[in-house]
Image (spheres, rainbow, N blue to C red):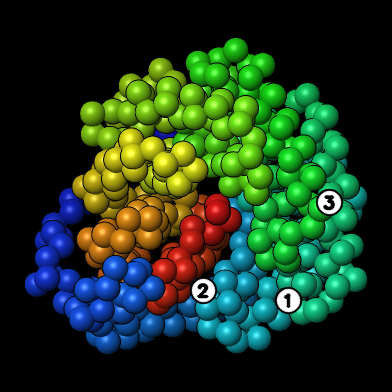
Amino acid sequence: MCASSSDERHFPNSFPPFSNETAKDFFDLSSLSSASTSAVRLSNGFHDRLVEAFDELFAQWEREIGAQRTDDTSVYTGVGGYAVLYHRAFKVLQKPEFLDKARKIVDSISVGRLQHKDRLTFLCGDGGTVALKAVISHIQKDDRQRDKWIATLLDCKDSVVQSRSLPDELLYGRAGYLFCLQFVRTHCGASSSIDAAIEDVKNRIIESGESANGSFPLSYAWHDKEYLGAAHGWAGILFQLMRTPNFDKDAKSKELVKATLDGLLKLAFRSGNFPSSIGNESDRLGHWCHGAPGFIHTLLQAHKTFGDERYLRAAKRCADVIWDRGLLKKGYGLCHGVAGNAYALVSVWKATGEVAYLYQAFQFAQWMFDYGNHGCPRPDRPLSLFEGLAGTLHFLLDLRTPENAEFPCFY
Ligand SMILES: [Zn+2]
C-alpha cells in the first residue's frame, strides 16, 4: 500500500512568484510571447544546469543499480521501473543503448501465463512487464515477440473482467490492467483486439462502480475504504476511464463519470486540496497518491472531456496547494514526493499555456538539483521509479522538452 500515514510536512516555499524578472533565470524571455507551449524555450543557463544535474544523478543511479541485488520486478518499486526510465531516456535522448538496457531488464524478468491473482497491473504487477516487453519489441521491429506479448496481455482480459475479488483501483486493480492496454496501444498502435479489450474492461469498471452502492453514482473501495486519490481511488480510476479511446461516444459512461466527478468536487477542502478518503477531514496529504497532485490530472482530463470550466478552476486551485506546500519533506519521488508534485504543475501549464505554472515546476526542479541535501529520509526503495531517484530523473529528463513531459505510467 502506498505510504500515507506520516504527518503532512513540507518545507516552506520561499521562492518568489512568477514575474518577468524572476522568469529570466529559467526562460528565454523572447519565447514567452508565443501562445504555443511548444515555442517556450529554456534559458541557456537553466538548460545547462538541468543537463548537468541529470547527468550527475543518472551516473550515480546507474552505478547504484549496477551494484544492487533485488527480486522486485515491479514498475513501482522494482527493476521494471528502471526499464521505464531507460525507455524514456531512449525516446528523449535518442540513444539506442538505452533501449538495449531496457530490453535487457525486461528480458531478465520471466513471466508465465498470467492470471488475475498474479496482479495484472502496470505499476505493481506483471502486466507492466508484459506491456514493456511488447513495446520494446515493437520499437526493435521484433513483431513476432511484440504480438506474442500483446496476446499474453489480452489472454488475461477475461480473468480481469470476470473476477469478483479484483479491486478497480490503479495499483492492484482493473484500472491498472486497463493502463497496460492503453500503454501498448499508445506505443505500438491501435488494433481492434486491443480496443475491444479496453472497452470490455472499461464497461466492467463502470458496472462495478454502479453496483457498489457507495457515496456516488460510481463508487469504488479498496480494503473497504473509499479512497479519492490517484493510487487507490477515484482520481486514478476515472482518469483511466476518460482516457479510453471511445469514451466520447459512450453517453451512459460519460454521464456517470461526470455525476461522480461533480460529487467529488464538493468534497474539496477550502484550500482546494482533496481528502485522501471519504470521511477523512484532515487536509494534510498533498501527493500524487493522495491529494491534489494526483487529482489535477483527472480534473484536467475532465475539462478536456466535458468542456466544463469548473474542472479547470478546481485544477488550478490544486496547483495553488502544490505551490504552497508541495516541497515535501518525504523527498524527491513521484508517488509522494516533489517530482510527482512538479509534474502536476507542468500538466496545468500544458493545459492552460500559463507559463507561471511551468516556472513553478522549474523552481521545484532546481530545488531537486540538490538531491539528498535537504535532510529528507532515504526512501525504502531509493533507486525506484515511484519512490526513488529513477522518478526524479524521469522528471528532470522530461523538463528539457517540457511540452512533451508526461507523468510516467499515468497518461
Ligand atoms: Zn505515494
Q: Residue at x 73, y 30 (%)?
A: 204
Secondary element at tag 1: helix
Question: Is disc 2's CB within 8 Å of ligand 1?
Answer: no
Q: Which mark is residue 80?
A: none
Depth order, front residue of 195/150: 195
**Residue 38 in view here:** yes
Secondary element at tag 2: helix
- Quarter containing the N terminus: top right
Amino acid type at mark 1: Ile
Of labels 3 and 2, the one closer to you: 3
Image spot of residue 269 (x, y percent): 28, 28
Q: Residue at x 89, y 62 (%)?
A: 148
- Quarter containing the C terminus: bottom right
Distance of mark 3 from mark 2, alpha carbons? 38 Å
Q: Which residue in the protein does label 1 denote?
A: 139
Q: Residue at x 35, y 23 (%)?
A: 266
Q: Which residue in the protein does label 3 denote?
A: 193
| Quarter of the rendering containing residue 178 | top right
Image spot of residue 171 (x, y percent): 61, 42
In the displayed image of the protein, which residue is found farthest to the top? Answer: 213
Amino acid type at mark 2: Trp
Amino acid type at mark 3: Ser
Depth order, front residue of 95/65: 95
Looking at the picture, does residue 179 appear above or below residue 261? below
Q: Which residue in the protein does label 2 denote?
A: 61
Q: Residue at x 86, y 73 (%)?
A: 143
In the displayed image of the protein, which residue is found farthest to the left? Answer: 21
Looking at the picture, does residue 139 appear above or below residue 306? below
